[in-house]
Image (tube, rainbow, N blue to C red):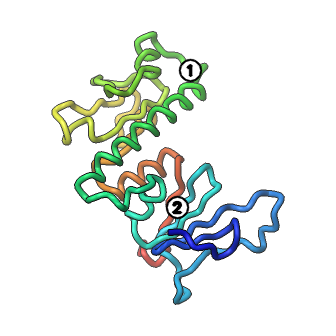
Amino acid sequence: MWTDIRPDKEKETNMGVLVRNASMAEDLSTLRIPTRPDGSFYRYEMIADGGWSRYYDDDITNLVGFLIPTYTDLPEEDRLAVRIRHAVNLQVRLQARLNMFFALSPRTSDEQELLSGPRHEQPMIEEWDCVVPLILIDSFYAPYTDVPRPASSIADVAMPPNIWWFRPAESETEYLCSLHEASLIDLHITKDEVA
């Protein structure tokens, strides 16, 4: 349950704190990084909602719960399915945005069909030649299924520029990191925790 600390700006949960970002018209001198009751900083900061929300917490599960309402109320065995469903919803929206952003980039009719196709069935391809990034979800490919992971034929690297992976099956932390890599959230950890 939320408790108001500063009306319309900061709200505290049982674990973390939500801060609504200030607009350009507001006085930024009042914006502060929330701290725990003992004055120390929270372990994580997540900026979401297109930059309008900052969420601070010590628990990665609560960060996922901020993005997926009721997530923390679910039994552990149901959380993966909810993360995958969330990933598919984000996949559809981000793929549509990328398709528009790369509208002038060349592609074949087959590539266009795959880029704009529905995602109730995930893309089943061996290679991706197109420069338009293809958003994929780890849980539908090896090692989680028998379907091999598609490879990029334009870059022989672990994270090619034309294949972006959401990783809900790997872990909560890896899922949030994959959303960070896709610029859907900004995820930060306190300097003391990184060392």
Q: Residue furthest top?
A: 109
* Horizontal and vertical percent position of residue 159: 39, 42
Quadrant including the C terminus: bottom left
Q: Residue furthest left?
A: 146
Q: Is residue 50 left or right of residue 145?
A: right
Q: Amino acid at mark 1?
A: Ser
Element type where label 1 sits in the image = loop
Residue under the image location 24 percent in, 35 percent down: 141
Which is nearer the eye, 19 or 109? 19
Q: Is residue 93 left or right of residue 7?
A: left
Categorize mark 2 by other alpha carbons within 10 Å: few (<14), some (14-19), many (20+): many
Q: Amino acid at mark 2?
A: Met
* Horizontal and vertical percent position of residue 22: 73, 62
Residue 193 sits in quarter: bottom left
Q: Mark number for residue 141?
A: none
Residue 28 sits in quarter: bottom right
Residue 33 sits in quarter: bottom right
Q: Mark number for residue 105?
A: 1
Residue under the image location 38 percent in, 27 percent down: 119
Above-or-below relation of 144 to 38 = above
Above-or-below relation of 119 to 13 = above
Residue under the image location 64 percent in, 76 percent down: 5
Which is nearer the eye, 159 or 60? 60
Among numbered discs 2 and 1, the one appearing first in the sequence: 2
**Disc 2 versus disc 1: distance between alpha carbons?**
32 Å
Above-or-below relation of 97 to 56 = above
Residue under the image location 19 percent in, 41 percent down: 143
Q: Is residue 33 left or right of residue 94?
A: right
Q: Is residue 190 left or right of residue 84?
A: right
Residue located beneath label 2 in the image: 46
